[in-house]
Amino acid sequence: MTNLGDNKIVALIINLTALILLAVSFKYSTKKSKKALKIALNKGLELAPALISIVAVIGIIFAFLPPEVIRNYLGADFNLIQVAAAALFGAVMMIPSLIALPLAGSLIDAGASYTPVAAFITTLTMVGFVTIPVEIKELGKKITFYRNFFALIFAVIISFLIGVFM
Amino acid sequence: MKTKSKLTKILKIIIFWLVIAFLFQRFFPERFPLAQEMSSRYIKEMLMIFPAVLVIMGLADVWVPTSLVKKYLGEKSGLKGKIFSFFLGTLPTGPMYIAFPIAGELLRKKASLSNVIIFLGVWASLKIPQLGVEIQFIGLKFSVLRFIFTSISILLISSLMEKIIKGENLELNN
């Protein structure tokens, strides 16, 4: 969110893409397109409570957590333990990324470093401790163990690399 | 959940936060404007992008059924198979718990393990609508870097796992 100009361009591209896809879809099948819009609406209503809460929490974070506090815990002088903690936090949490990404962005706006945020996002998406039972049932113990284990380790590596290049 | 109960839930959440905002303004009048400013900035950002993202996901849901993903993922092998698995993973279709059963079925049908791992990894972390939201809220550079490093990691993980697990019994439930 640091650069509002960029944001508008991204939003414009995504909205145009959606409109074009929708137009093409309507050209081929009105029925399917209406169904797609209904799915979108339902999904939106489902996500809305969490989105509203996230927006409120972001406001409270900015009002009460001085940027120095966020910088101290998630800022430039992080160490491996903090990044590992961020990675573990992401692995344990079950937040849809559509909701977690705005929150992550707000932490960066408030002074957090990219590295712990990258660790959090990577494990949030790639490692799922909560879904391990489902994964074992479908893929077996071996695949589940190695997949989550490697994803956790690579998440830390990815986040340090992002920190270096940002 | 029915639409009506969803709306009730949204209404409850709005009332809850309005009450909190009221108390907030009363007890911390000097901090309230900052909170209000940040929250409204994020509401604007979300309204700018979420409806479009949801429409794209809805369209993908209708036009790219999981049966299609299954059909193509199982077929190809070699480098082509890897690229194809990667591409199928980026499609804006459904959450992770839908991907596991697809992956399981493919493995039982003897699809290559590394392709299935690539598909799962990309499905989880490099979905197209998710990338748009990421660019919007965190930034293009961050998103591009994460995309590159995560893609490389997924490829490495998939070949590591194929080497480790090769020939072993996968203990799959049939």
Image: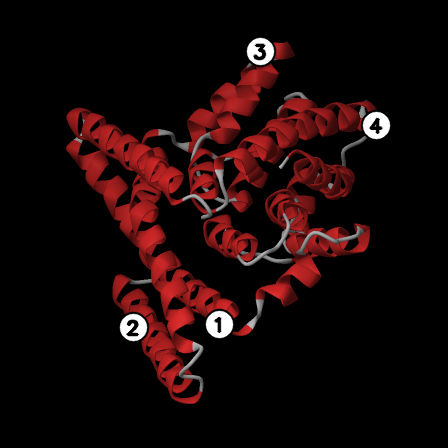
Task: Report crowding for label 4: few under 14, some 14 to 19, many 20 or more residues within 10 A (C-alpha).
Answer: few
Q: Which residue lies under the disc numbered 1? A: A63
Circle 4 residue: B164
Q: Tag 2, which secondary structure?
A: helix
- Report the Cα–Cα distance between label 4 and label 1: 50 Å
Q: In the image, what residue occupies the spot 66% across and 46% down?
A: A123
Asked if labels 4 and 1 share a chain, the reply is no
Question: Quick check: can you spot residue B129?
Answer: yes
**SS class of the residue under badge 1?**
helix
Q: CA distance from mark 3 to mark 1?
A: 51 Å
Mark 2 or mark 3, whichever is nearer to me:
2
Task: Please give the residue where the numbered disc 2 appears in the rendered image.
Answer: B11
Chain on which label 4 sits: B
Between B68 and A40, which is closer to the camera in this rendering? A40
Question: Would you say A12 lies left or right of B137 here?
Answer: left
Is residue B80 depicted above or below B66 in this figure?
Answer: above
Choose between B131 and A73: the one closer to the eye.
A73
Mark drawn on residue B32: none
Between the residue at mark 4 and the residue at mark 3, the CA separation in whole angstroms equals 22 Å
Identify the residue under disc 3.
Answer: B80
| Earlier residue among tags 4 and 3 | 3
Give how far across and how far down residue B53 sits, in percent. Answer: 35, 42
Q: Residue at x 67, y 25 (%)?
A: B152
* SS at circle 3: helix
Under circle 4, the secondary element is helix
Identify which amino acid the numbered label 2 is placed on: Leu
